[in-house]
Image (cartoon, rainbow, N blue to C red):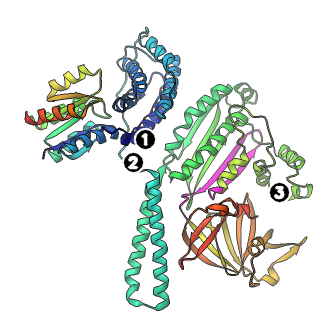
Amino acid sequence: MDLSKYRELFLTESRENLLNLNKYLLALENDLTNVAPLNEIFRSFHTIKGMAASMGYQKIVDLTHQAEDLLDKFRKEELKPNEEVLRLLFTAVDRLKSLVEGEDLSIDDVMKNLELVSSGEFGKLDIKEEAKLRKIKDIRITLDYLDTLMNIAGELVINKDRILKITQDRLIEELTSPLERLSRLVLDLQEKIMNIRMVPMWQVFDRFPRLIRDSSVKLGKEVDFVIEGKEIELDRSMLDKLTDPLIHLLRNSIDHGIESPQQREQLNKPRKGRLLLQAKRLKESVEIVVEDDGGGINPDEVLRVAKKRGIITDEEVEKLTPKEIFNLIADTRYSTKREVTEVSGRGVGLDIVKERLSALGGSLDIDSTVGEWSRFTLRVPLTLAIIKALIAKVGDERYAIPFSQVSEIININPSSDIKTVHNKEVMLLRGEVISLIRLSDVFEIPSNGNSNSVIVVNVEGKDMGIIVESYFGQQEIIVKSLGGILGDLPQFAGVTILGDGKPALILDVANII
Amino acid sequence: MSTVLIVDDAMFMRRMLGDILTKHDFEIIGEAETGTEAVEKYKQLKPDLVTMDIIMPDMSGIDAVKEIVKLDPEARILMVSAMGQQTLVVEAIQAGAKDYVVKPFQPSRVIEAVSRVIKK
């Protein structure tokens, strides 16, 4: 029998069961008297064992068999789990994960310990009720396949728009109504494919409790980790790309945010720190908040460092809002070679988190009250594949500006509205001065001289205006990545093809300003 | 062509078993992931044969066998068990299952057992 074609299925299903194992081991660790997780843990070991046996992975079979044996004794109340056993089981799950992923490592020590525990003497358990088990019903499709489907749907949209344009230009009336129907169908198809790509946050969030536990144990901190909104859905590839930044922020909170239990008691705070991970669905985006009730960020300290590193001048300090001050800590120049601890180490700083988010068309916002809390707010569009954008016209060129970055559009009278201060163009927006840039200057393209509209974008909590000649309304565009030498240009987030078949570059606003 | 209902909580197992059976001219008319679902599907589909896993969420394979036999005393059920579950297999046979195969299974063993049960 050709087993290779089952490998992928083995991997996805084993990973799912490994997530389950961590989840229910944590539940058990939180309350050792709760027997509900035991059945789930047993079943996950058992399922992995069955698959591994069919695939001929002997080590996995041995390990899961031994673990299953022990779990069965817990289930039958022959033995009772304690904290030490839990630690052993966590280790067993870690080894199992490596084995599943194809690493070859020794499991002798874990096997021996599991055997020892299985033959140990423990008291009897007080069994309460049967576990209510979760039921998953789904089929699996690889992401590549969905990407291909998405691409085809994208091409359909583009071709439909072209036919639409020709029909309108030549006034072919018979085509109007079938085309309308086609438009709706294509839109529907695209939406359905989009929906398949959406996965609930828990697929990633459920890994975090274990991580938080390990990190806080290592640092001697006590943390109450709360997850909210894990049923919120997000594009699979977006979620994948958010995992590292989230891990960084969470570890950051445990490492630098939440104080040690002793410190907290002295400060009259509850011994246990609170760490919140919360997802919220906004209109066209998802907001993820990482918030801790630790020491917060001291704005005076931030300003001192920012000035020392030459990020801001004394004059600029006056104008900064509190939020703008906090956001300085995500500047690349701010975090130079700070002390790297094992927990939040890896050299990944807030600047990299911010960079990653901006590459995803999202943003990072930082807020805090010193001594009380810090809050990191991530905002990302629902998907990477299709975005709503504004098409701006400059000279003969058209550029797409993601709607997630646009806060408003203002039609102006260039001669009276645009003012010059220190050789820089600015304008007044509801009493606030905002600086302006011209796309024609940024990309050095000839402009026809008109500057009728200002697109206001929000970058790092600060409004900026982009002067364009004109713009077309909001449009759904298919994002295609730029290859070759263009791919390295930070000003562009990709390219799209417009209704007339011509390409338009998609701007990454944060990197233009 | 004989019709089969495959019951197993792991898609991996359902796929593997399904592939083996399809290759030997059995028609897979349904799959179930839990005991409860197995009973429901049995009522709906009236398959010629059921392959039944034992450890599953919400209702075990053994309880599902009992339920199905209650509905249809002639039901032909083949237990698919893992190593070291002999006592459970015995329990299942007593409950009305006709035969069993042990995971990891050889395709030839599966086909033998299935054909045997179908003829019963």
> Between disc 1 and disc 2, whose residue precedes?
1
Tag 3's secondary structure? loop
> Between disc 3 and disc 1, whose residue precedes?
1
Image point (15%, 24%), residue name: B94
Amino acid type at circle 1 is Thr
Residue tagged 3: A320
Residue A433 part of the magenta segment: no
Q: Position of residue A236 (x, y in %)?
A: 50, 51
Q: Which residues are magenta?
A: A359-386
Q: Which mark is residue B19?
A: none
Along the line of sight, the residue nearer the viewer: A457 or B15: B15
Residue tagged 2: A140
Is A394 above or below relative to B34?
below
Amino acid type at circle 3 is Leu
Q: Chain of mark 3?
A: A
Residues under labels 3 and 2: Cα distance? Answer: 50 Å
Marks 3, 1: nearer the viewer:
1
On whether disc 1 and disc 2 are found on a single subunit, the reply is yes
